[in-house]
Amino acid sequence: MSGYGYDNIDPESRTDFEFSEASIRQGFIRKVYGILMVQLLVTTGFISLFTFYEPIGTWTRTNPMFFYAVLILSLAMIIALTCCEGVRRKSPTNIICLMVFTTAEGFLLGSATSTFSATSVLLAAAITVAICLALTLFSFQTKFDFTGMGPYLFVALIVFVIFGIVAFFFPILNTFYACLGALLFSFYLVFDTQLLLGGKHKYSISPEEYIFAALSIYLDIINIFLYILQLVDSARN
């Protein structure tokens, strides 16, 4: 008896469909990592400028209104990209918004890292690169599916934010808070990477959401870097 299920599709047609789907997914992955690479290069440029050219960091600290204006711009762009599907999926609007966000975020990160020594920044960057590469390779190779952990990670993020408010009033907790932050966003990096990969995983992200995918992984890496930087600076001092 014939039916409407996938099992009744001609084997040759099924193979062609799976090959086409795999090709689309591979192109999607390349596009996301290409965009991510540009984002990280822009951010690295800003951090290097602020780290090795002290006057610009001093200027930023003496002109806080400019810093807050850039912060508001950054928040506006991230809200637009995460909450507005029309903005996120419409080209070239999505690319323009992402680049504006990346530039603003690079400036903010540069301002933040200018208060740390160059040695701490370089060491934190090297550790972050090693961790992110290891986690990405792990995400590609592991048979464990992390894509179903979204709700648990979200709850962990809420608890982490609440703990951060408490740690603000008790500086003795700062090191522990930074450890938790680095660990939490390491899990998020694995989660977002597996959503990107799709395939055998339970959940995946649509190839149309290449901007959202790049933004998610970028934020994971940036957060890991910031918490590692706090830990490195704390250890050195």
Image (cartoon, rainbow, N blue to C red):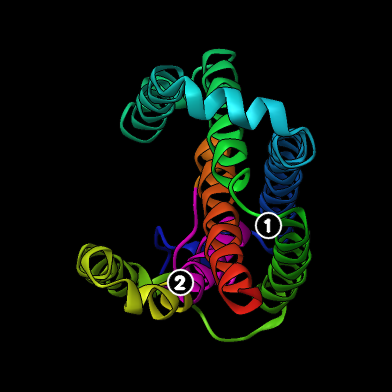
Across and down, in percent, residue 162 comes to 19, 66
Q: Dot 1, crowdedness within 10 Å: few (<14), some or many (≥20)?
A: few
Q: Earlier in the sequence, mark 2 or mark 1?
A: 1
Task: Tell me if mark 2 has few (under 14), some (14-19) or many (20+) residues whose alpha carbon lies within 10 angstroms of its own.
Answer: many
Can residue 103 be spotted in the picture?
no
Q: Classify mark 2: helix, strand or loop.
A: helix
Disc 2 marks which residue? 178
Quickly name the residue at label 1: 18
Q: Residue at x 52, y 65 (%)?
A: 227
Q: Nearer the viewer, residue 147 or 17?
A: 147
User: Looking at the rendering, which quadrant does residue 163 occupy?
Assistant: bottom left
User: Where residue 185 appears, x then y in whole percent?
Assistant: 48, 66
What residue is at 60 percent from the left and 29 percent from the top? 58
Q: Nearer the viewer, mark 2 or mark 1?
A: 2
In front here: 4 or 100?
A: 100
Q: Which residues are magenta?
A: 181-205
**Looking at the picture, which amino acid does disc 2 mark?**
Ala
Location of the N terminus by quadrant is bottom left
142, above or below 70, in the image = below
Left or right? Give the position of 137 relative to 66: right
* Residue 192 lies within the magenta run: yes
| Picture layout, residue 55 above or below residue 44 | above
Q: Is residue 131 above or below residue 17?
A: below
- Residue lying at 54% horizontally and 65% vertically, measured from the top left: 230
- For the image, the number of numbered tags is 2
Magenta segment, prevailing SS (helix, strand or loop): helix
Amino acid type of the residue that numbered disc 1 sits on in the rendered structure: Glu
Quarter location, residue 124:
bottom right
Q: Nearer the viewer, residue 140 or 230?
A: 230
In terms of secondary structure, where does tag 1 sit? helix
Q: Is residue 1 left or right of residue 152?
A: right
For the C terminus, the image quarter is bottom right
